Amino acid sequence: MNTNFIIVIAGFVLLLMALSAISSIAQSGETRSAKARWIALVALLPLLGWAIWLGRGPRRT
């Protein structure tokens, strides 16, 4: 397989993960400032921010 193809697919998957986390954060019941901090974390560090949100973010009921 072409290395560039794998890099592009990995980037696309990372983008989808970040967008899903941001969507989840925006719909959460957190305060505005908490949402802004979470979104900034996910936007600046997509993989790490997504993983932290997955583990520590508010749970849906």
Image: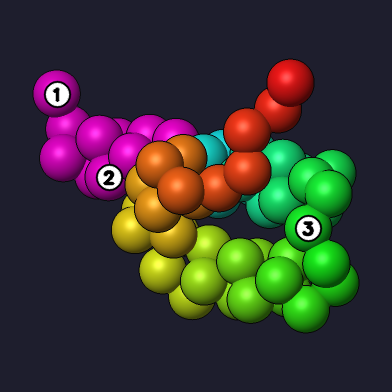
7 and 35: which is toward the camera: 35
Q: Which mark is residue 47?
A: none
Q: Which residue is drawn at 83% across and 49% down?
A: 29
Residue 21: image x %, image y %?
61, 45
Label placed on residue 1: 1
Q: What colour scheme was applied to this rendering of the protein?
A: rainbow
Residues drawn in magenta: 1-13
Residue pointed to by mark 2:
7
Tell me which amino acid carries mark 3. Glu
- Give the residue pinned by disc 3: 30
Task: Give me the residue at 53% from left, 63% from top.
Answer: 42
Which of the marked residues, 1 or 2, is nearer the chain's N terminus? 1
Bin the neighbour count of mark 2 within 10 Å (Cα to Cα): few under 14, some 14-19, many 20 and up.
Answer: few
- Identity of the amino acid at label 2? Ile
- Residue 9, placed above or below residue 31: above
Q: Which residue is drawn at 25% across and 35% down?
A: 6
The quarter of the rendered structure image containing the C terminus is top right
